[in-house]
Amino acid sequence: MFRIIFPVLACLCLLFGAPDSGQAAPTIIRFSHVVGDDTPKGQAALKLKSIVEERMGDRFVVEVYPNSSLFDDDQIFEALLLDDAQMAAPSLSKFTVYTKSLQVFDLPFLFQDLTAVDRFQKSPEGQALLTSFTDRGLLGLGYLHNGMKQLSANRKLSVPQDATGLKFRIQPSEVLKAQFAAIGAEAVPKPFSQVFSLLSTGVLDGQENTWSNIYSQKFHTAQTHITESNHGLLDYMVVTSVNFWEGLSSEDQRDLRAAVEEAIAFANDLAGKIEQADRQKVVDAGTAEVVQLSRNERNQWVEAMRPVWQQFEDGIGRDLINKAYGANQ
Ligand code: SIN
């Protein structure tokens, strides 16, 4: 009997389709980023994927694309607007074309450490920045930490004059360009995925980045020195498109936002630990000398770079700069 009924049912399914379970297929969220899985951002994306799978797997599936495997940072905003990706966490320096206010995060020697950064990001002013470019079709869902930046080069950098005439890779940011101009160096904006090759072939002399990015991208094997300058911040904003977000029900928005916030809290808690561990791995590798600055040397970097604040004060707003600086207390 079964031998007769089963083929008949199979044919009916082929002709009329499988019986409708009444459930829509889960919405795919492509989370595209440019760093490795073992970095704070990589961990945040994977945590989000697992939270969503566990709690709302019938409604959403998060697909994580690390290491620029789907989009590079110079393509991601357009990809979000075209719905080719639904979430990303670009570095705050890469938002310049969408809002000048976010340039505050690029000002050299503004924040002492991640505690101060966190305090500012959680303030009403910091939170307001998340929705400051919805008119451009993008919506911030939260801030994600990486850490403070260090300067690396193919020569020892102890005082600003040591960097004169060198070519540094920067993220596409006018503030970062001005920061290197202030020390007589040339700044060349390039996508993250190209940095290792540009350094190892000697096309560029140096770059600035966090310990986790230096270690995970092996920049320490392509540079002779890394100055522990902590001169700037590299943090992220988890971002989606207004179109994608507004297409979700309010229940889905609530649950997804909670999942994103939990993933961010998880990764922010890890960021400091990853920073310390990766710093140590770079020191242990011994391929690049880690340069410590004396108080006097550090003051020279501060003095050389601080004038950049004034250059961008009109665009960012003096009150916002004061608020951010005040978070150091
Ligand atoms: C990132 O951490 O997402 C990349 C930072 C960079 O472009 O240097």
Image (cartoon, rainbow, N blue to C red):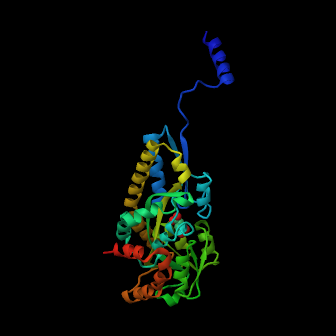
Q: Residue furthest top?
A: 1
The percent position of residue 318, horizontal first and vertical second, equals 42, 77
Q: Residue at x 52, y 43 (%)?
A: 61
The percent position of residue 252, horizontal first and vertical second, equals 46, 43
Q: Residue furthest left?
A: 329
Eyeballing the image, is 12 above or below 123? above
Residue 272 in sight here: no
Q: Which quadrant of the structure image shows residue 135? A: bottom right
Q: Nearer the viewer, residue 98 or 218?
A: 98
Q: Residue at x 39, y 60 (%)?
A: 268
In the rendered image, which quarter contains the C terminus? Answer: bottom left
Residue 275 in sight here: yes
Q: Is residue 327 left or right of residue 300?
A: left
In the rendered image, which quarter contains the N terminus? Answer: top right
The percent position of residue 222, horizontal first and vertical second, equals 57, 74
- Give the mark count: 0
Q: Is residue 57 left or right of residue 117?
A: right
Q: Residue at x 55, y 84 (%)?
A: 181
Eyeballing the image, is 24 above or below 329? above
Q: Nearer the viewer, residue 214 or 315?
A: 315
The percent position of residue 218, horizontal first and vertical second, equals 54, 68
Q: Nearer the viewer, residue 115 or 279?
A: 115
